[in-house]
Image (spheres, rainbow, N blue to C red):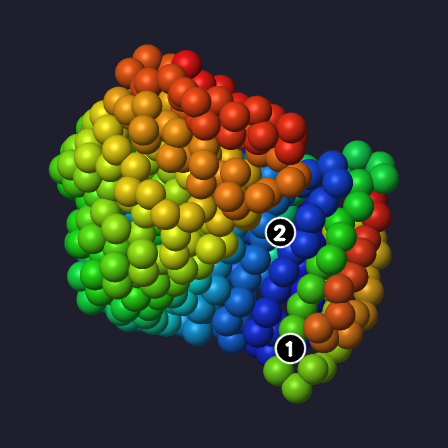
């Protein structure tokens, strides 16, 4: 069976296939639509796609959540030299093969999403893509280093998590002043330190858990819109930084590291999940965190975990503060 | 050995369209009741489009107007 737009093919600028229930499979061919600028076919079971090379003005291509398979460079020949394309999304398909190339010819690229595909080789180089806002390559099988992010001043979302073969270090984020979300978690061989975040004042989510990072957690003072910070299961040392400036913080997870201090200060009453278990926190540190959360006066509960191996137990006022938090609906774990 | 003719585009005999050999989306016969939701086409000048759903139904749809079709 065949859906066709019988007329007027040459005037069609945008096609959205919509979604089918139950899902329809089959092949899509856009070669007849020479004026097409936008094509989306999200969330069907499409198994093959062709014809984009005949659509010289195609700037948006969305085929996420389908069943495309085969080598990416065969499926999309010459595609990654295309200067017109702005949005490319093939998340959650079965597309494979190496993508070890530069995207520098894609001068208008704004969103590049290939997550949840068995892609291999090193990640594509993107340092020339100064319009790039979204780079989403998580849950693939990439290896090698994370590409340089220098000069990517428009970058908003960078998601490379769950690529177990990635190694090297987290690159400098100093040029990424629009960065809102950053995730390199579950890259178990990723080492070095968490980079300076003082220029990333729009950052609301930072995740680097389950890596091999060391050194200190950097200052978070500049991150006034930070909501979610997760760095658990690394080898980070030094102190938990002051969270006084993070007045919108919801989640702070730093458990299973080597942290041995708390820089003190207030903690926002927006925090509902604070986990620092399995570190080296002293009795004074544990008491200080409990006191800060009591002072925050959040009355709708939350989760606080300061237990596990390595941390000291609260004493005196710390025990009173623990009881106070429990009375406010918190689930509190300490030694 | 059998011969295979792969005809791309419309086959016309004496000006009459007999068959459509290639299309936008080719898929196996859907089960009865399968619904395609929010099929959407936009055209230059917002001219209307003729869509052959492949099940014998041909529909004229407006530009930039989501359309549903049930097989």
Q: Residue at x 44, y 68 (%)?
A: A59
User: Is residue A64 in view?
Assistant: no
Q: Determine the chain carrying the residue at label 2.
A: B
Which of the labelled discs sits on residue B43, or is there none?
1
Where residue A10 appears, as percent x and y from the top left, is 57, 76
Q: Give the distance between the C-alpha atoms of the residues marked 1 and 2, in whole angstroms.
A: 18 Å
Q: What residue would you read off at disc 2?
A: B25
Where residue A231 appears, as percent x and y from the top left, is 33, 35
Q: Residue at x 39, y 29 (%)?
A: A287
Say few, some or many: other residues with alpha carbon within 10 Å of mark 2 (under 14 / 14 to 19 / 20 or more): many
Q: Residue at x 68, y 54 (%)?
A: A18
Q: Nearer the viewer, residue A30 or A20?
A: A20
Q: Nearer the viewer, residue A104 or B3?
A: A104
| Residue B16, picture quadrant | bottom right
Where residue A259 appears, as percent x and y from the top left, is 25, 29
Q: In this picture, is A141 found above or below B8?
A: above
């Amino acid at each position: 069976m065949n859906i066709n737009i019988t007329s007027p093919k040459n005037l069609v600028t945008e096609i959205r296939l919509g979604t089918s229930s139950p899902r329809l499979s089959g092949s899509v061919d856009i070669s007849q639509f020479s004026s097409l600028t936008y094509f989306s076919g999200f969330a069907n079971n499409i198994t093959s796609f062709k014809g984009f090379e005949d659509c010289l003005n195609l700037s948006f291509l969305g085929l996420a959540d389908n069943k495309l398979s085969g080598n990416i460079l065969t499926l999309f020949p010459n595609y990654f030299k295309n200067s017109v394309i702005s949005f490319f999304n093939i998340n959650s398909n079965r597309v494979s093969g190496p993508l070890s190339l530069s995207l520098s010819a894609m001068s208008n690229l704004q969103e590049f999403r290939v997550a949840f595909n068995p892609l291999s080789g090193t990640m594509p180089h993107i340092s020339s893509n100064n319009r790039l806002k979204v780079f989403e390559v998580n849950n693939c099988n990439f290896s090698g280093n994370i590409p340089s992010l220098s000069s990517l001043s428009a970058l908003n979302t960078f998601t490379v998590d769950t690529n177990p073969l990635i190694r090297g270090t987290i690159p400098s984020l100093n040029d990424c002043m629009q960065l809102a979300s950053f995730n390199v978690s579950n890259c178990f061989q990723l080492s070095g330190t968490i980079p300076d975040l003082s220029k990333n004042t729009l950052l609301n989510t930072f995740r680097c858990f389950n890596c091999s990072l060391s050194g200190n957690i950097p200052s978070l003072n500049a991150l006034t819109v930070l909501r979610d910070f997760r760095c658990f299961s690394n080898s980070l040392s030094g102190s938990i930084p002051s969270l006084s400036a993070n007045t919108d913080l919801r989640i702070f997870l730093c458990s299973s590291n080597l942290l041995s201090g708390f820089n003190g200060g207030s903690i926002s009453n927006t925090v509902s999940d604070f986990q620092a278990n399995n570190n080296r926190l002293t009795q004074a540190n544990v008491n200080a965190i409990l006191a800060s959360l009591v002072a925050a006066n959040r009355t709708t509960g939350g989760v606080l975990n300061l237990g596990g191996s390595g941390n000291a137990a609260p004493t005196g006022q710390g025990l009173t503060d623990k009881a106070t938090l429990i009375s406010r609906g918190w689930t509190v774990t300490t030694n | 050995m059998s011969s295979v003719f792969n005809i791309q585009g419309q086959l016309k005999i004496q000006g009459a369209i007999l068959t459509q050999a290639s299309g936008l989306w080719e898929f196996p016969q859907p089960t009865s009741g399968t619904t395609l939701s929010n099929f959407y086409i936009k055209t230059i000048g917002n001219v209307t489009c003729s869509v052959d759903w492949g099940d014998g139904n041909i529909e004229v749809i407006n530009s930039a107007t989501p359309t549903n079709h049930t097989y």
